[in-house]
Amino acid sequence: MKILISLIGKEVIGNFRVFKYVNPDKVVHLYSDDTKVHNQNLVNTIENSYNCKVESFDVGGFDYDSCLQKLHLLNINADDEIISNISGGTKIMSLALYAFAHEINQAENVCYFDTNQNLHWLNKKTKDSVTTEILLEEYIELQGQKITSKINFEDALLKFKKVIKFIKYHHTSESWKVFLKDVVTPFRKYRDSKNNEQSIIKIISNELVSTKSFKLSFDDGKFLAKHNDVIFLRSTLSEADVDFFFFNAGWFELLTASELKKKYSPQNIYLSVKFPYLSNQSTEKNEVDILINDNGKLIFIECKSGDVKSEHIDRIKNRRDTFGGLISKSILITKYPLETSSNPLLSKNIVEKCREYGIEYKTLFDLSK
């Protein structure tokens, strides 16, 4: 039997990657009071999705004798292969596991997993490159969370192909700025006042919002916008997709994702990733504009085509901490540099807050370079 012994810290993605790579028959975890929840998240993922039994021991993270005592409780046969992963946990836990491996004559199977996804075999002086894939849902489950829904970027490219072409041509034009100011902004203000109960079609058909020089219509499944009686745009997208793309800044998210695919695999880019409350999974708790599964960590992308407020930065940090764990990353993408804001002091404060929270800040133009 192949048995993997792992030490559990507050970041368990590395433990999970080693588990998937080693593919053991049984897993043993040593965890402390501080990592009890993290251990349980990992155990749930392994047992529920991979049908592999996990035996967990609560040890004193800084008590060498406690760690050894729990390891001595293991039933090990002479022909068992014991792999000791000394990554994670405390240094005391690592020392105890290392000593135990020598005690049972399995020192050649002591390993350490680094942040570059390499598994080092300490006493063989070799290393393996771990390329085992982790699914997006698995990353989230390891944080004790769930995903309600997500849009694969490749699917979005097909669905929005025509309007993406339109927006790539128009998004820097004066006419698009006018459309945002005279149509999108009043629509959003009106819907905010109604708690988003009003559909796009109802607002347009009943002329509930003044759109100044624009005339909107939604007839026979076609969305049409005329500017001074000249057709500005037309689309055969569904009402929900028109709503997302034109009225909820989906256009900016797709432009951003189109630039990100130059660096990241399109199949690992997701849009509008929604998370539920765990106590009531029919209710949405949070949404991430763009989420990238970057082979070892999650990258959370927040897209802001308009004003950026201090509370937005707080939400970006909270999403990363809640759903991504310690090694995840957050990036804020804006249409205009924050420094061009009408409130320079506020902009400086936001830039400083991004830096303190470890949030990267770029403009869409920066991504296109």
Image (cartoon, grey):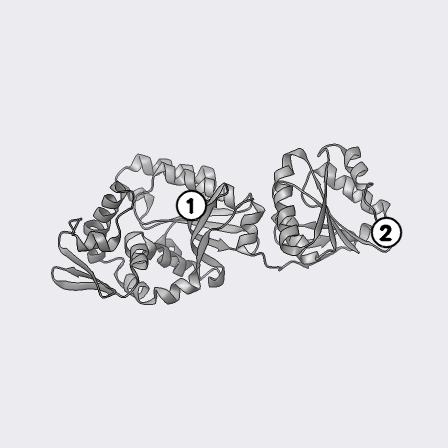
Query: Which residue occupies the foreground of this view, 177 or 288?
Result: 288
Q: Considering only order in the chain, which callout, 2 or 1, is on the residue closer to the N terminus?
A: 2
- Image height of 268 relative to 187, above or below: below
- Image height of 226 relative to 82, above or below: below
| Residue that carries the numbered disc 1 in the rendered image | 284
**Disc nearest the viewer among 1 and 2:** 1
Q: Which mark is residue 77?
A: 2
- The spot of residue 315 in percent (x, y) is 42, 40
Residue type at numbered disc 2: Asn
Q: Residues within 10 Å of mark 1 (few under 14, many from 20)?
A: some
Q: How far is disc 1 from disc 2 in space, using C-alphas? A: 49 Å
- The spot of residue 126 in percent (x, y) is 74, 57
- Going 26% across and 48% down the picture, which residue do you hit? 198
Residue type at numbered disc 1: Glu
- The spot of residue 249 in percent (x, y) is 32, 52
In the picture, measured across the screen, residue 90 lies left or right of residue 172, that is right
- Mark 2 lies on a secondary structure that is loop
Q: Residue reaching furthest right?
A: 78
